[in-house]
Every structure is written in structure tokens, then in C-alpha cells.
Image (tube, rainbow, N blue to C red):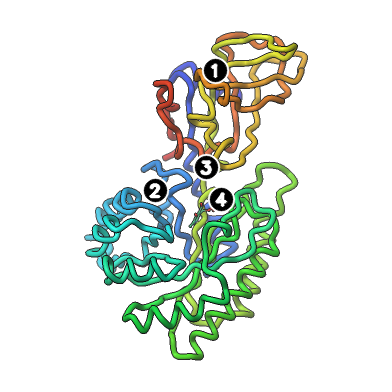
Amino acid sequence: MKEKLLQLAEKHGTPLFIIDHDKIRKNYRLFKRHLPKVQAYYAVKANSNQEIIKTLFNEGASFDVASYNEFMQVYEYVRHFEEKQKDFYIWDRIIFSNTIKDIPTLRKIKKYKPLITYDNRDELLKIREHCGTAGLVLRLKVPDTGSQVEMSSKFGIEIADAYNLIRESFELGMTVEGLSFHVGSQCTNFDNYSSALQITSQIFNDSRQKGYPLKIVDIGGGFPVPYDSTVPKFEKLASTINSECKRLFPKDVELIAEPGRFMVATTAILISEIIGKARRDGKIFYHINDGVYHTFSGVVYDHWIPNFHAFRQGTKEVCAVVGPTCDSFDKISVSEYLPENLKIGDYLYTHNIGAYSIASSTKFNGFDGAKILHLNN
Ligand SMILES: Cc1ncc(COP(=O)(O)O)c(C=O)c1O
């Protein structure tokens, strides 16, 4: 594998972001095999590369979008196939799951009669005024303890307020189609899912009993990626979700999910290049041609800890690996165990960098982002 990576780096230059579409298909199929009753709406925010959308669409995925641009990116792609798929129905393909949307966005998506999430009364009134054609999914606040990225401090209605908002939504002439939650990203504490499903079922069943016919339960994202051997197995989580859903919800419930990182994190490798080497306060600093403003943005925004591997052998010591910009904040890792004999022009590679990486890369200091190479697409 190392040999192939070296060849690709030589051929295409670095930084080189290599996406393996066979792995995307493998992840999608793993998800569907273990959660056969759950329709996967891939969270485009994890990596919005069009080729990824194409591969997942061909596998049968739907999509979770967060902005007008993401909405149109998916919509245009799906519409392209509309003629072949006569029964194309937008809710089957897209959920707009950003709970807060600005007014221009609502006005623009109104004509598509979208399925959208919300989590408070002001948003309800805004949606009703500017996008009255929408079907609604109410996002609940659920436990997110121990997840790599917590969500519940910013999103989700308090459970005690949920039923009243559902009733008010119907009274205002809107239709609440279902409920959603997100247990936090890279959730390794599976109790979060059990609690969230329990909470959701109470509101779901209660609403139905009182005459509000909810249909959808959206179990969000959070499905953990095996970044290391301590991460509990997805299969175990899937089995819990399956049994809890069977126990808690009526047979006709429509289950959907919004997996992001699970589909793409393991599918990409980045090859970067050492462009400078200095000893600072006794520690070797490897300056490379990619950093936290670019493909390693996940270090900042995703609380992600990357791994680095060298192609050259040598005595290892604790080194720092830093990005190319003039900002001292641009440090990817200050304690990476790497050979001390690496030279300028040597390459490093980093696994599991497919999610929340190029998605939030900037042009800071005038550096271009990594070149993207697709394999097996
Ligand atoms: C609303 C929503 N759905 C889905 C996701 C995807 O989450 P994950 O990558 O943990 O699967 C996110 C991530 O931020 C999100 O905000």
C-alpha cells in the first residue's frame, strides 16, 4: 500500500486527498445490512464532494442538507435522474436538517415543498410565513454525554416543551411529520441512543394518541467510526437500535438517519509533504504543506486527533507537525511519534481523514486546499 501511495504522490503532487469509493460503498452497505429498516440520509456537511454524493446516490442513499447551496447541490443531482425515476419525491431524497434557516433560504426552498427540521416557536412562525409548504420534523434535545462533538447545548427543544409545540404547529396549519434527534457526533456512549429513542417514543406515541399523526423518527447521526480499537462496534449499536425501535414504536413508523462521518471518514487518506524542519526548544518541528486551516481543519472544529505515518524508517522521537501558514495556531500535533531523520521533501500520510476535513478547508494565507483524487469511482 505504501508503494502505491508514494507513486500517487509522485504522480499527482501533494497535498493529495485520496478518496476510495469502494470503501464508501462498503460503509453504506454495512449501515444498511445492520439497520435495514432505516433509510440513510447522508449528512452532506461531512464531505460535500460531488463524486461522494454520486456514489452514495447510486447505492440508494438519501441526503441531509444544511444550507441552500447543499440543498441545490443534491436537488440538481437527483433531479437529473428524475425522468428515469418517475416516482421521485423530494422527502424521500432530501431532509433539510439545519434547525435554523434564514428567511431568504426559506423563501427559495418554498417551491420545492421540502421536509425541514425546527426546534423552537420562532422558527415555526418563520417557516410558516416564508415556507408554508414545508413538512416539519421537530428536533428534540437528547443526552449527548461522551460524544466527540456535543450537539444538545445548541440544538433541540426541551422535552417538556415538545408536545405543546407540536400541537401549536398543527393549530397553525402546519404538519409535523415526525421527530428527530442527534446524540452528538462520534458517539461511543450507546446509552445516548437508548435514552434518545425512549424519550422520542414517549412524545411520538403521546402525540399520536392525542390525534397528531406523526410518521417519521429521524435518529440523526453520531454513528461511530473505528478511529482506534477502543471504539465500540457499530454492529452492537445497530442491534440496540433495532430492538429498541421494535419495542418502542408502532410498526408503521418511518425510520430515517443522518449518518455523516460513518460513511466517509475511513474512506480517505491524505499525503502531505515536509517543507521545512527545525529544532525548537529541543523538539523537532516538521513543517508540512497542509494544516489546520486546510485539510486538518477537523483538529479545530471536530476535536479530531490525526495520526501521521512516515514512509522512511528511523529512530522515533516526539515531534511536532505543523501547517504551512504564518499563524502559530496552525499546529496539527505537538506530540507525534515520528522518525527523527525525515528530510525536506519526504511524505507523510494520514488515515481516516474523509470527514469534516476538506469540508471546512479555507484559502488562508493563499494556500490552495489539497488536490482530490478519486479511486474506484
Ligand atoms: C443535523 C445533523 N445531522 C447529521 C450530522 C452528521 O453527524 P455525524 O457525522 O456524527 O454522523 C450532523 C453533524 O453535525 C448534524 O448537525
The residue at which mark 3 appears reads as 355
Taking depth in this image into account, of 304 and 345 the one nearest to the observer is: 304
Q: Where is residue 214 in the image (x, y as percent from the top left)?
A: 45, 80
The residue at which mark 1 appears reads as 273
Amino acid type, callout 1:
Glu
Quadrant into which the C terminus falls: top left
Foreground disc of the pair 1, 2: 1
Left or right of 19? Residue 187 is: right
Tell me if label 3 and label 4 are in contact, CB under 8 Å.
Answer: no
Badge 4 element: helix
Amino acid type, callout 2:
Ile
Reply above or below: 135 against 359.
Answer: below
The circle on residue 53 is 2
Q: In which quarter of the image is residue 247?
A: bottom right
The residue at which mark 4 appears reads as 262
Q: Where is residue 234 in the image (x, y as percent from the top left)?
A: 65, 56
Q: Which residue is drawn at 41% across and 59% down?
A: 100
Foreground disc of the pair 3, 2: 3
Q: Where is residue 286 in the image (x, y as percent from the top left)?
A: 62, 16
Badge 3 element: loop
The circle on residue 83 is none
